């Protein structure tokens, strides 16, 4: 599939990056067991004075923090003021860092390898900047496709999110950086997030929303962040059923510390500390935005509460021990780099901003690889793709749409400026896009070098777009949609956080239609943080659709990689794309309700998110969960299911590349439970990444462990395997099932 010249040529595309290659190479440290770490923490706590203990569990205040959050140091014992920093997709807001693709892009790769590699690279950059804790990964399920922060996490499926959690955390912590699983829990929309009351039944809680956190605990995550919202009527950060000694996290063996989201301590210091909160951030924060409450007391009054006995001193000791244990466990007590940036002075003006670059050639290449491997080819008629540079000489190609353009990088964190390409959503989950290689640069460079005649219309003006497209051999139209975190910007393109609707932004659908009306070879590129309505997808003139998602800074080179076939697309949709929001079975609640001032949101859909809801309600999505095309084809044969001695089932099958070019298949295993179990018809329980040369085949093995064949049983508070026959569905998506068996 790869003409040699093309590869060499593509590798030469400018990535736009001055490579400093000064990332911390000495990330070697001695990993301790929890037991060893707690023994050290205990010994240290015994030497601390009351104010030192309180300082370690309390932020220094938003405007005194050098990082997004800092605790108070204990210099006499060599304990630094831990630096906690955003966020899930890279260090922000600062310079000299890589703008990695966000969680939803990692999910779309359906590749544990890339999820892990992304975690390692993130960890290396956080370590290089001297940051003790990476405030991620975000594990909030995309309960509704409009949810503002859905792209920070890994989509609506708890299994994929759980696997991504495990790989990401393992990667980050492998270089000695603490990871923080967030936001616990049911933090699934931006409207009214500071106080909405999520009502989630026990089984749904365990199988859906808690499950990724269970996988985080199994990865030995250092910290969990409690959310702004209330759960079952009590604020998450003072909800003992969640964070207390007998709460869900501790019952599952969580050993690290529970930190509040910034300002999520809605109750008194004693309430929070006694409920199970271990660290308050950022220390002095009063939330008044978004028409919500609230001022709070936080842990600032902890000293008097400990002195008066409202908070037992043994509880304070436990809080400090839990904060110190992950620090010892990951060897941060020895040789950890000092903080060498200043998030408060991201413009470079700050006295402490040393601007140490932690970028590297390898990280830039990885950002590009993840972006290319997360691009989902949704349609490809008449071999419209890949574009063949060999045959491109003299061809007339139009590039249309403002999503092709460079972002204005000078207006803040990243994408709040809506006048260029969409690489990532906005808010604390964004990253510092010091470098972006926009589609126009990479496409134009590639096409020009191949001898094509390039015409552009780099706005969303329909008339201009159609004019540019008319008479062209190919029209490439780029369109987008985005969302972000409430409270960062009043509104972006009229959207406050959660999206207002599932339409493309800036009348993108109208632009596609106008171009397709005049050009019979229209290739659409969609950059989006989640599903969008695509009524035009069946238009015969739309020959190909590349759903390039949220690709991060290497957006242009990665797009060229897949459009020209240097990378054979293997991204798979981590959500379904249906025709309207109703098809997803959930809503974003925008009405605060009465008389509480915050809505009660009852998770009545229970286990039925996304394709699970569509499967039950016989809704055919336009493109289903797990779907994605390749430039080659794959055949599945030889399903075998055997029981193992350890109560697991071993599922194996053969995947063969039956096409003419090399490619990567992402086989998926969906489990059908016995009817008595009350599970959705198909539940994702396995996926793999299989790279195959033309004609090659490989045996794929997926093991179903006991818990993966179980349902949450409320009376016994445990996972129990229901009796009866199970069906194994193996296929290329949630609906493209190639092999079926039972056990
Ligand atoms: C978690 O830590 C425990 C004890 O410190 C260790 O035995 C276990 O292997 C770790 N798990 C992972 C996935 O690293
Ligand atoms: C640390 O101290 C606590 C509280 O006294 C105790 O329960 C725990 O066993 C100690 N851990 C270790 C490893 O010494
Ligand atoms: C939340 O409330 C539901 C319904 O009352 C109950 O089933 C569930 O156990 C509660 N969960 C927690 C963690 O308190
Ligand atoms: C495309 O590349 C050519 C040749 O380098 C250059 O003249 C032209 O300005 C570029 N067009 C755009 C839109 O960048
Ligand atoms: C497809 O494009 C051709 C121009 O090449 C145009 O004549 C035709 O009407 C278009 N078809 C549709 C369905 O828009
Ligand atoms: C939530 O909905 C379920 C199912 O309709 C119902 O049984 C439950 O009582 C509701 N909970 C609340 C708090 O309204």
Image (tube, rainbow, N blue to C red):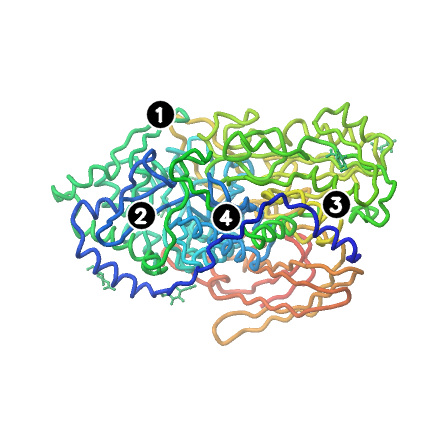
Q: Residues within 10 Å of mark 1 (few under 14, many from 20)?
A: few
Q: CA distance from mark 2 to mark 3?
A: 47 Å
Q: Which residue is mark 2?
A: 241
Sequence-first tag of 4 and 3: 3
Q: CA distance from mark 4 to mark 3?
A: 30 Å
Q: CA distance from mark 4 to mark 2?
A: 21 Å
**Callout 4: SS:** loop
Q: On the rendered structure, is 16 left or right of 329?
A: right
Q: Which residue is mark 4?
A: 607
Mark nearer the viewer, 2 or 3: 3
Q: On the rendered structure, is 616 left or right of 291?
A: right
Res 595 label: 1
Q: Which residue is mark 3?
A: 379
Q: Residue 635 lies in what quarter of the image?
A: bottom right
Q: Is mark 2 within 8 Å of ligand 3?
A: yes
Q: Residues within 10 Å of mark 2 (few under 14, many from 20)?
A: some
Q: Residue 256 lies in what quarter of the image?
A: bottom left
Q: Out of 151 and 740, give the one closest to the viewer.
A: 151
For ligand 5, give the image quadrant.
top right
Residue 652 point in image, percent of width and height: 62, 69
Question: CB atoms at circles 1 and 2 under 8 Å apart?
Answer: no
């Amino acid at each position: 599939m790869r003409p040699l010249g093309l590869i060499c040529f593509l590798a030469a595309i400018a990535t736009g990056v001055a490579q400093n290659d000064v990332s911390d190479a000495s990330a070697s440290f001695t990993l301790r067991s929890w037991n060893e770490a707690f023994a050290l923490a205990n010994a240290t706590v015994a030497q601390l004075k009351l104010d030192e203990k309180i300082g370690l569990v309390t932020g220094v205040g938003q405007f005194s923090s050098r990082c997004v959050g800092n605790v108070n140091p204990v210099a006499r014992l060599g304990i630094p003021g831990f630096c906690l920093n955003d966020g899930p997709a890279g260090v922000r807001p600062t310079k000299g860092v890589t703008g990695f693709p966000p969680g939803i892009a990692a999910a779309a790769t359906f590749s544990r390898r890339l999820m892990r590699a992304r975690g390692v690279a993130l960890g290396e950059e956080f370590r290089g900047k001297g940051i003790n804790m990476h405030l991620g990964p975000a594990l909030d399920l995309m309960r509704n496709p409009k949810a503002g922060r859905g792209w920070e996490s890994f989509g609506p499926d708890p299994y994929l999110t759980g696997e991504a959690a495990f790989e990401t955390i393992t990667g980050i912590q492998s270089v000695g950086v603490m990871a923080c699983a967030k936001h616990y829990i049911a933090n699934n929309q931006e409207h009214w997030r500071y106080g909405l009351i999520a009502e989630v039944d026990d089984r749904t809680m365990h199988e859906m929303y808690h499950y990724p956190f269970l996988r985080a605990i199994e990865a030995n995550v250092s910290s969990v962040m409690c959310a702004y919202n209330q759960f079952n009527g009590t604020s998450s950060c003072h909800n003992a059923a969640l964070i207390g000694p007998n709460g869900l996290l501790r019952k599952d063996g969580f050993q690290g510390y529970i930190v509040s989201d910034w300002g999520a301590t809605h109750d008194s210091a004693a309430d929070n500390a006694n409920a199970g909160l271990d660290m308050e951030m950022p220390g002095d924060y009063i939330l008044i935005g978004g028409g919500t409450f609230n001022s709070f007391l936080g842990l600032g009054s902890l000293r008097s509460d400990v002195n008066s006995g409202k908070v037992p001193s043994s509880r304070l000791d436990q809080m400090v021990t839990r904060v110190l244990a992950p620090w010892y466990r990951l060897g941060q007590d020895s040789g950890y780099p000092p903080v060498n940036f200043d998030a408060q002075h991201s413009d470079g003006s700050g006295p402490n901003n040393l601007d140490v670059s932690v970028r590297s050639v390898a990280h830039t290449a990885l950002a590009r690889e993840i972006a290319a491997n997360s691009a989902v080819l949704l349609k490809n008629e008449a071999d419209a793709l890949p574009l063949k540079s060999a045959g491109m000489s003299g061809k007339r190609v139009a590039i249309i749409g403002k999503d092709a353009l460079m972002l204005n990088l000078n207006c803040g964190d990243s994408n709040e400026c809506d006048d260029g390409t969409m690489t990532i959503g906005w808010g604390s989950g964004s990253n510092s896009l010091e470098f972006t290689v926009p589609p126009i640069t990479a496409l134009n460079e590639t096409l020009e070098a191949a001898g094509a005649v390039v015409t552009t219309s780099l706005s969303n003006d329909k008339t201009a777009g159609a004019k540019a497209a008319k008479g062209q051999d190919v029209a490439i139209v780029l369109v987008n949609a985005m969302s972000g975190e409430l409270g960062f910007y009043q509104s972006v393109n009229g959207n406050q956080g959660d999206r207002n609707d599932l339409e493309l932004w800036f009348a993108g659908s109208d632009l596609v239609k106008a171009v397709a009306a005049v050009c019979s070879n229209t290739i659409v590129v969609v950059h989006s943080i989640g599903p969008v309505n695509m009524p035009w997808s069946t238009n015969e003139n739309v020959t190909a659709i590349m759903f390039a998602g949220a690709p991060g800074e290497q957006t242009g080179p990665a797009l060229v990689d897949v459009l020209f076939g240097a990378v054979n697309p293997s991204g798979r949709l981590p959500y379904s794309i249906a025709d309207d929001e109703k098809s997803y079975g959930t809503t974003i609640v925008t009405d605060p309700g009465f008389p509480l001032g915050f809505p009660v949101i009852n998770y009545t859909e229970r286990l039925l998110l996304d394709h699970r809801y569509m499967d039950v309600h016989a809704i055919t999505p336009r493109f289903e969960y797990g779907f994605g095309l390749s430039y080659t084809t794959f055949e599945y044969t030889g399903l075998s299911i055997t029981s193992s001695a350890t109560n697991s089932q071993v599922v194996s099958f053969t995947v063969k590349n039956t096409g003419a070019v090399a490619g990567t298949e992402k086989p998926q295993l969906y489990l059908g439970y016995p009817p008595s179990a009350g599970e959705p018809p198909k539940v994702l329980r396995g996926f793999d990444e299989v790279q195959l040369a033309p004609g090659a085949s490989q045996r794929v093995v997926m093991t179903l462990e006991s818990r993966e064949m179980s349902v949450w049983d409320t009376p016994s508070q445990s996972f129990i395997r229901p009796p009866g026959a199970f069906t194994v569905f193996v296929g290329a998506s949630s609906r493209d099932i190639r092999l079926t068996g039972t056990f």
